[in-house]
Amino acid sequence: MRTHTDVAETVSALIDIAGQRRPDDDVLAQFVERYYRELPPDDADARRLDAAYAAAVTHLALGRTRLPGEILVEMLSPEVERDGWRSESSVLMFVTDDIPFLVDTVRMVLDRYGLGIHLLVHPMLPVERDQQHHITGFDDELSSRGLEAWTLIELDRCPPERVQLVADEVRDAIAEVQMVVDDFPTMRDRMRSLADGDPLLEWLGEQHFVFLGAASYERTGGAGSPELTLIPGSELGEYRPEARFSAVEADPPSSASDDEVVIARADAVSMIHRSARFTSIAIRPPGTSVEHRFIGLLGSGAYRESVFAIPTVGERASEVLALAGASVQSFTGRAVKNVVETLPRDLVFELDADALATLVIDIVGLQERRIVRVFDVAEPVGPWTTVLVYVPRARFGSSLPGVVERLVGHAYDSEVRGVRTLVGASSLARISMTVRSADVDLDRLAAQVDEATATWDERALDALIEVLGEVEGRGVFREVRDAIPSDYKARVPAERSAYDLIHVARLAHVEPGSPDALETSLGRSIDDADDQWRFRVFRSGEAATIAELVPLLGYLGLHAVDERPYVFEHPDGVVHLYDIGVLFEGAVGPHERADRQLAELRAAFAALVAGEVEADGLNRLILAAGPPVGRSPCCGPTADTSSRPGSRSARATSNRPSCAMPSWHKRWRRCSRPDSTRRVSRHRIRPQSSSTHSEPTCSYASIVFRHSTTTASAGRSCADRCDPADERVPADGGPWSL
């Protein structure tokens, strides 16, 4: 209710302004009240009262004197010094007789110049004029035939050099609309006189066809290549000699068939009502050599009505059901009927029963499969063909029609016209368009469309299937599909997501805080520099911070250069992914790093996170200068306790790779003084004060340092000097010994 009050208040304020500023102008106040009576509520803005008043005054000045049938047009970009008022928009004003298709046609002109509309005021005013054609007042009892259209359009600011050009084209467009409207009854009567009981022609003449032009021709020549010669004086509407289109060259050419009525689309595009190729209706009365042509557009009623209810066309559609061998009540019959009803309506009018049945049966054969398929339907007359592209509905988005249009236009090397989309209950969406005919490999075009329009989810599923196989790949994707965050999809190519999604699917079911709640991966793109890698940390449950993880990478000789955290919210648990870009120290290329060494690096990181080894800079020797894989210096945390059934350490490491500890560490054993010892659990070793019974730790790399300082005479392996099954440390927490 408030919005209506706002409009009423705005109009009342404008009337008051008119009375105050021009008290002697009785027409202005009446004009303002009627002019803004249907103002959109959102535009009833008190801050724009001065501009609204100035626009009304300017428009009234334009149309205050007008001859019958005269078209008055003005376009300006108001400036205070020149016009006495200013607007950030350009303003187009015109006054004409009230005729159909007026606003649609003017909007098409503005679209061609790329000018967007901000405000449209389009009242039909019952204007009274005196003998000199001046406005004297308004008569609300005036019949609709005496109404005048006063149209105001606020639009994008137009460059000064184009203002008059746009105004002239708008005037010409309105003049053509007026010319068509004047000839409309004559064109309709001509078709009715030629119908001779044809139910389709009679149906078209009853508000189902927008007549835009007509002409008659003498048809000569052989049956294979008939020629049409214009009969002078037969031109009407858009085919008048002074109109935009010439009737001399028949468009489309005459069909070689003997049909008495031929419906086809012309090459020319309508500039009135809507931008679409003309529909041409050719009528050939029996026993004559004359072909009568009517061009126009199918009316809105022709699209709303069921195909099966349209005379002649409905019979053709029913014949399609018979050719398909399906009853209306069957599943196939219902599918056939649905396809016929939803096909581009122009095709249904143009194709004969056989061609229509072939197309419909092929489309029904898709059986709702989520695939990409392209159909090429040649028009019966002329060089054009209709292309129908079916894609999975899940792929449909605002950019999809444009992508398909570019691919089809490139494949046919043709301009593309009449792009239309259909998205309904079917699992397939359709994009249709017309192009000039060419020899095109439709399978290849379909593959290109498939590649260009595949969604991130579809490509990720393909990547998982390639890694895991059909069954397991689909299972993993179903597990994580709804948990994948949008920012992950935006940054990570679907083709590279498979291993990440496998980690997420596994960790979603792991108890947070358990030994298996952390996984890592280390990889790189083929296009990255040799020392650029991505270190990914997957963690179930509680989130970590980049500030906690980055220093640990530094201890391993990896310098973090960027980080991208993601959160996968799975119903069974939250999984955090920290995707960290790292640089390796030194100039050694990745081709010189063994896979096992990289696995040892990941295992060392996991041990650092778990607190199982000491965090210090010497750990970077694992990467930068560690002994070759396979050599066994006698230092390093033991891994042998993983073989003890039921031990905490066994549970902690049972799901880690066999190379979780470097091979050159595995023979190291903890040695102790023979006196006063106690057994130690190795599940988590944390450095503590020496005054307590602690579980001391050592870094991976410090082991290497100790080994390098051991004399040859004392170089016996720890395994030779300790019981491998008896891990002992001093009871007083003192230093470790070799």
Image: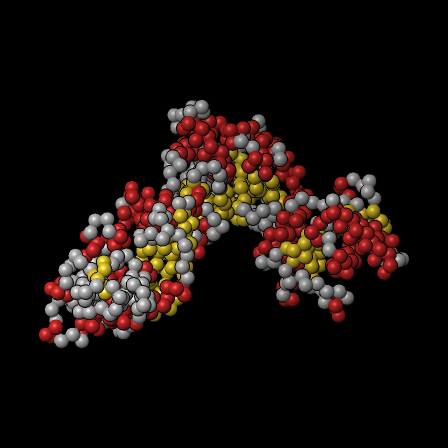
Q: Is residue 617 visible?
A: yes
Q: Is residue 619 left or right of residue 437?
A: left
Q: Quadrant of residue 572?
A: top left
Residue occupying image coordinates x 16% and y 74% = 710
193 over 236 or under it: above or below: above
Q: How is the image coloured?
A: secondary structure
Question: As drawn, which residue projects farthest toward the left?
Answer: 713
Out of 533 and 325, give the one closest to the viewer.
Answer: 533
Q: Is residue 259 left or right of residue 24?
A: left
Which quadrant holds the N terminus? top right
63 over 699 or under it: above or below: above
Out of 128 and 623, give the one closest to the viewer.
Answer: 623
Which quadrant holds the C terminus? bottom left
Residue occupying image coordinates x 44% and y 56% = 487
Q: Quadrant of residue 64?
A: bottom right
Out of 541 and 638, give the one closest to the viewer.
Answer: 638
User: In the rendering, at what x and y percent does residue 263 appear?
Assistant: 51, 37
Q: Is residue 481 visible?
A: no
User: In the rendering, at what x and y percent does residue 344 appear?
Assistant: 49, 39
User: In the rendering, at what x and y percent does residue 135 appear?
Assistant: 83, 52
Residue occupying image coordinates x 64% and y 52% = 106
